[in-house]
Image: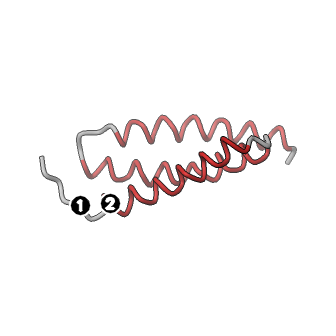
């Protein structure tokens, strides 16, 4: 697969993943919200690949930080009970 094709696939994946993540995390339902952290984490490999490939060190480091925060979100919210 050519690099430009792989990057295009990553771009589409990032778009779909980002929209899905935002919808889930902004949900009032805790059971949906916690899955937003999982979908966000699933999007990180594409972010890391694209930012590393562009040699954009700042965005790559930000993507590494986001990866850690999505993991933190999963740890903090996975077993939490619905309080509404």
User: x%, y% of residue 63?
Assistant: 60, 47
- In the image, taking residue 10 as reference, residue 80 lies left or right, namely left
In the image, farthest residue toward the left: 84
Q: Residue under circle 2?
A: 76
Density class for disc 1 (Cα within 10 Å; few <14, some 14-19, many ≥20) is few
Q: Residue at x 42, y 37 (%)?
A: 22
Disc sitting over residue 37 in the figure: none
How packed is label 2: few (under 14 Cα within 10 Å), some, or many (20 or more)? few
Residue placed most toward the observer, 35 or 62: 62
Q: CA distance from mark 1 to mark 2?
A: 7 Å
* Residue 42 image point, x, y percent: 54, 53
Give the quarter of the image for residue 4.
top right
**Marks 1 and 2 close (CB-CB < 8 Å):** yes
Q: How is the image coloured?
A: secondary structure
x and y, in percent, of residue 2 in the image: 87, 44
In the image, residue 33 sits, relative to residue 26, either above or below, namely below
Residue 52 in the image, given as x and y percentages of width and height: 75, 48
**Hey, which residue is sitting farthest front in the picture?**
58
User: Regarding mark 2 in the picture, which secondary structure is present there?
Assistant: helix
Q: Residue at x 32, y 60 (%)?
A: 76
Task: Tell me the residue at 74%/41% (across/down).
Answer: 56
- What residue is shown at x 23% (from left), y 40% (from top)? 28
Element on which disc 1 rests: loop
Left or right of 8? Residue 76 is left
Numbered marks: total: 2
The residue wearing badge 1 is: 80
């Amino acid at each position: 697969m050519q690099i430009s094709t792989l990057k295009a696939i990553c771009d589409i994946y990032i778009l779909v993943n980002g929209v899905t993540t935002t919808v889930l995390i902004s949900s009032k339902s805790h059971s949906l919200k916690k899955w937003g952290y999982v979908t966000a984490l699933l999007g990180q490999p594409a972010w890391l690949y694209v930012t590393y490939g562009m040699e954009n060190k700042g965005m790559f480091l930000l993507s590494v930080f986001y990866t850690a925060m999505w993991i933190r979100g999963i740890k903090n919210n996975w077993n939490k009970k619905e309080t509404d």
